[in-house]
Image: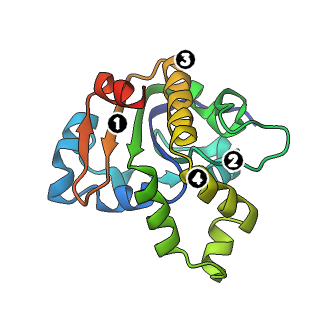
Amino acid sequence: MPQQPIQRLLVISGPGGIGKTTVYERFPSADFAPLRAALQIEDIHAWPLYTPHTLKQHAGQLPGEVVLHYEMTRLITRPGYQLTEFERDPALEVLGRASELSILTLWALPHIVARRLRGRLPLGSRIRQAFLPERRYNATRRLYAEPQAFKRLYLAWLEYCDSVNAHLHLVADISEDVPRLVPMAEFREALG
């Protein structure tokens, strides 16, 4: 099936449990006004939200404006992949189809992300098992316990994003309830 181009694509990226869906849901709130202005998207809910799985199901029939919910840790347990081999992830091939590509990378300190993941999805929960299989859940939690590995994940993601020539790439610190846009140079420096 031919792959038609996408007019505008927004990738909301971050590791599992950071709050990608929450950001999408809360986007219309007043706290997100600076983010809406920076991304030049007023009504994000007019744009359908796809995960890599649902994107694959609808590949030939995507609308002109799309949001991709991309979990940066999705390769953590996939056989034959290294965690940071984003260029090999078939889910990201769609980036090349976008006339205008924007990337919103979400950041929070590893211990905050680990707490969110643990608190939202209790071990043994049927919902958590559907959301994140046991092996991937445990591997992701181990990653969050290693701040240097967490930073390397982000550095690899930034390098990948540089290679796809996005129209716009923003970083939002969502450690608190109100997102804070972080200048890219400041973010890169903080990662070391």
Please give the label number shown on residue 51: 4
SS for callout 4: loop
Identify which residue is drawn at 52% across, 70% down: 118
Of tags 2 and 3, which is closer to the observer? 3
Marks 1 and 3 close (CB-CB < 8 Å) = no
Give the Cα distance between marks 1 and 3: 17 Å
Residue identifier under label 3: 163
Q: Toward the viewer: 98 or 2?
A: 98
Q: Do we see residue 40 in this rendering?
A: no
If you read the primary sequence from the N terminus, does the residue marked by circle 1 or circle 4 appear first? 4
Please give the label number shown on residue 56: 2
Q: Relative to residue 127, is residue 185 depicted above or below?
A: above
Question: In this rendering, would 140 be left or right of 25?
Answer: right
Of tags 3 and 4, which is closer to the observer? 3
Q: Residues within 10 Å of mark 1 (few under 14, many from 20)?
A: many
Q: Residues within 10 Å of mark 4 (few under 14, many from 20)?
A: some
If you read the primary sequence from the N terminus, does the residue marked by circle 2 or circle 1 appear first? 2
If you read the primary sequence from the N terminus, does the residue marked by circle 4 or circle 2 appear first? 4
Residue identifier under label 1: 171
The image position of residue 151, as x and y in percent, is 50, 36
Q: Toward the viewer: 148 or 69?
A: 148
Q: Relative to residue 31, is residue 187 depicted above or below?
A: above
Marks 4 and 2 close (CB-CB < 8 Å) = no
SS for callout 2: helix
Q: Please, what is the three-letter code of the amino acid marked with disc 2?
A: Lys
The image position of residue 41, as x and y in percent, is 28, 42
Q: Residues within 10 Å of mark 3 (few under 14, many from 20)?
A: few
Q: Relative to residue 17, is residue 64 depicted above or below?
A: above
